Amino acid sequence: MFFVDHRYKAFIFSGALMILFLVSFAVNGLNLGIDFTGGVEIQVMPNEEFEVEEVREVLGEAGLEGASVRTVRARETGEDEAAGGFLIRTAELPPEQRDALVESLEQKWPQMDNTIRSVGGVIGKEMTQSAIIAVVVALVAMVGYITYRFQFNYAVSTLSALMHDVIIVLGVFSLLQLEINEIFIAALLMVVGYSINDTIVIVDRIRENVKGGRKKDYPRVVNESVFQNLTRSINTSVTTLLVLIALLIGFTYFIGNMDLIVFVIALILGVLAGTYSSLFIASPMWLTLKQREFRKASDFDGG
């Protein structure tokens, strides 16, 4: 009984990851983008060759050494890489400092085109609150439905798997300091949806298989239920990952939009974590809770 026999190893492994990521949250925090913190985003298309070091020199002269600089690849136009540009993201700037920065950039690249987007701190705070509310509401609604449709133990084990997946995605972003923006929240909700779909299929199979079964048969039934859905879970995950990897390559080498790249990275992490948690966390967790329930009932009867 592979999944049942190795459940505590899986719990220890996941627990170690959770501790690592929680430490990362405490030390590094999350790299929140200007969508949440407020700030200025300047996209520049120099229309000539440039180096990132040149951009940083201009920012240094403007006193913005800490600003984020990212290259933006142009779509395939038959031209060379000079058709691309760069994206500057920094904290909110006074109008005069922002104008001075744009002027310095124009002096460096006279033929440049630029687009400026400003997000206020109040808007960023509202977006942060809305994002947290969206995730919490989604989780609560899922737990409520699973409790109603199945049992509370199923809801607890499913919620454990969901939180496991969310923390893994956030933890990797914290470790690598990848920027979290509004599109990341959409990716996170998609991860939750994907994970719960994979988990519910196995949980429903367990519910069907345990009907009329004896307590001592539960470990065997759980293990068999997972194996009955193993091929489906793996095939679904592999085909989804192939599509996401293709998108990642396309976004990286042909579009160059960092927001889309981060979006796909979050989905890839979510698919991997969701597949793992549906097999090694949710079902074994349900069995553990059920066995604990049996022990309590036995102690009560014996008392």
Image: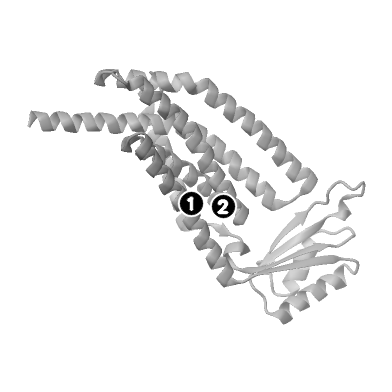
Residue tagged 2: 185
**Can residue 100 be seen in the rendering of this structure?**
yes
- Quadrant of residue 292 within the rendered picture: top left
Label 1 crowd bin: few (<14), some (14–19), many (20+), radius 10 Å = some
Foreground of the two, 260 or 139: 139
Q: Check the image and report above or below for 142 versus 292.
A: below
Residue bearing mark 1: 135
Given residues 225 and 15, the one toward you in this image is 225
Q: Is residue 170 left or right of residue 144?
A: right
In the image, what residue occupies the spot 86% across and 69% down? Answer: 108
Q: Quadrant of residue 157?
A: top left
Residue 266: percent from the left, percent from the top? Answer: 59, 45
Q: Estimate how packed mark 2 is, as few (under 14), some (14 to 19) or many (20 or more) residues with alpha carbons within 10 Å.
A: some
Give the residue type that dot 2 points to.
Ile
Instruction: Please tell me how many numbered marks the rendered image carries.
Output: 2
User: Is 180 on the left or on the right of 55, as rendered?
Assistant: left
On screen, residue 229 versus residue 52, left or right, reads left
